[in-house]
Image (cartoon, rainbow, N blue to C red):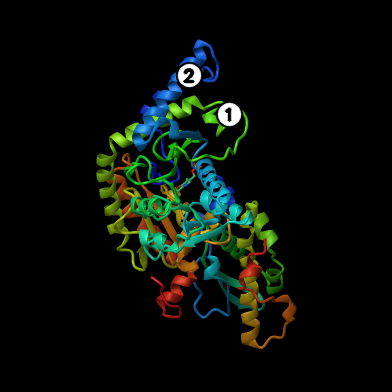
Amino acid sequence: MALYTKTVMDHFMNPRNVGEIENADGVGEVGNAKCGDIMKMYLKIKDGIIEDIKFETFGCGNAIASSSMATEMIKGKSIEEALAVTNKQVVEALGGLPVHKLHCSVLAEEAVKSAVKDYYDRNGIPYDKKRFPDCGNCEACHMV
Amino acid sequence: MMIYADNAATTKMSSTAIRAMLPYMDQVYGNPSSLHTAGQQAAEALQSARERIAVCLGCQPREIYFTSGGSEADNQALISAAKIGERKGKKHIISTAFEHHAVLHTLQGLEKQGFEVELLPVGEAGTVTAQQVADAIRDDTCLVSVMYANNEIGSVLPVGEIGKVCRERGVVFHTDAVQAAGHLPIDVREQCIDLLSLSAHKFHGPKGIGVLYARQGLTLTTLIAGGAQERGKRAGTENIPAIMGMAAALEEACAHMENNARAVSALRDKLIAGLSKIPHSALNGDPVHRLPGNVSFCFEGIEGESLLLLLDAKGICASSGSACTSGSLDPSHVLLAIGRPHEVAHGSLRLSLCHWNTEEEVDEMLRVIPQVVEYLRNMSPMWKDQKSGKRTFVL
Ligand SMILES: Cc1ncc(COP(=O)(O)O)c(C=O)c1O
């Protein structure tokens, strides 16, 4: 379908890093079923580096592709670098998305943040709450 | 190999219809409004198409108005009936919650003009009864518009019974027969239909051409002003090639209606039986009163657009009512109207067959679809939560 770029279709058809990490150090889930997108990210973190990352996604082709792309962009990076990855960068790496689909990629950034926040919470690491907006809220996710 | 299973969206043209069109492009190409021979040849063709279509619907040729398709016919039918009502001080309109947007959006426009629109609930099976309509009719009801068959879930509605109720109560009855024409019997007299919309591309005719049937005596409102074509009710030089293609396609579809319906519904039933084996799935629409070619399912735990993309990659053309395919943020209003919760409505799949589909294609779909559903479920956090009991199954 010409709706999506080649890169989106590649990541959709052959998603990287799908699955679950057992004993993950941080897990984040955002989105909700009512909206038709749920994204879950699992992180394995060692010495501040994201050693491994996996995702599970319920959603459209684009949601799956942006999950896959986000995991690729983050794997092996430091937590700070991971937190700096924005939706815009994910969309750019995918070669662009149709305008009415942009909201799907909002979830990728939020899912990563949510997983890092979980990691901080589990380990009692202090953080600036403003950096971790409460996602999973339908309206916010669907603000195009 | 490509399996085309989206005949409710549009169909491949039949060679009969294509052949019927060709002479009207380079041989009989006159304007039917012209006085000369070339024009009059076209006018004769136009009249013959009108007559042949009238036979298929059981009406008079003068009751046929050519339009640009189903949407325009729906618009004109509803607006005309509303204007007639308004002149008598009647401004209540009854329709259903799962009409096509061509009807629903036109009704929204009428609401803005002060009409009161009542959308009947369609229940779990997706239908309305004549009794529901009878109970809703008031002294100030000017129009009942109920579709003959639903485009998404395939329910066939009792339009003959509804027509009778409307006739007895003196209310104009419109039916959107876009999915029914050429597939289900139509007799506007017997079914007491005052206004009916149809569209050629749903029965192997060309796109961009349709019919509004309006019972004699029912004054249509002109939406496209200009020349005197279509008895002054629809201006614009007639699309003769398309009209000829439509007439041929409708005649052909009506001539083979029973045989096609028998063959296609056998394929449909095989698909339904096979897909029903997928756990936590459900058939949408009326299981008995159903379009011969319609198979509509919801699969829990997955999203329809990703399902469509994967099916497309495996050569299967289908459709879905998920938000991501509707271009809006909500899943299809039809699935919501039959009570499917949002999360389930997102996981819908529609396969719509025609007589060119084969049993081999059905077998291939039954091989591929369960695999793809399983693949998507395996990467779905929602499905996982459901399997582990953290979230309850709906289906
Ligand atoms: C039930 C119904 N009504 C109306 C339409 C609109 O028809 P058209 O595409 O010819 O405007 C369609 C098809 O898209 C339909 O399925």
Q: Is residue B71 left or right of residue B388?
A: right
Question: In this orientation, does residue B38 appear?
Answer: yes
Amino acid type of the residue tagged 1 in the rendering: Gly
Going from N to C along the chain, the mark reached first, 2 or 1, is: 2
Task: Estimate how packed mark 1 is, as few (under 14), some (14 to 19) or many (20 or more) residues with alpha carbons within 10 Å.
Answer: some
Q: Going by the picture, which residue comes out furthest to the bottom?
A: A124
Q: Is residue B273 left or right of residue B315?
A: left
Where is residue A42, by image quadrant?
bottom right
Chain of the residue that carries numbered disc 2 in the rendered image: B
Chain of the residue that carries numbered disc 1 in the rendered image: B
* Numbered tag placed on residue B42 in the rendering: 2
Q: Are marks 2 and 1 on the same chain?
A: yes
Q: Is residue A41 above or below residue B267?
A: below
Q: Residue A133 at what x, y percent from top left? A: 69, 75
SS type, badge 1: loop
B134 or A92, nearer to the observer: B134
Q: Is residue B139 above or below residue B149?
A: below
Q: Residue at x 60, y 36 (%)?
A: B224
Distance between mark 2 and mark 1 Cα atoms: 15 Å
Residue carrying label 1: B236
Amino acid type of the residue tagged 2 in the rendering: Ala
SS type, badge 2: helix
Where is residue B247, by image quadrant?
top left
Q: Residue at x 52, y 30 (%)?
A: B231
What is the quadrant of the N terminus of chain B in the image? Answer: top left
Q: Residue B288 at what x, y percent from top left? A: 29, 57
What is the quadrant of the C terminus of chain B in the image? Answer: bottom left
Q: Is residue B223 above or below residue B124?
A: above
B303 or B100, nearer to the observer: B100
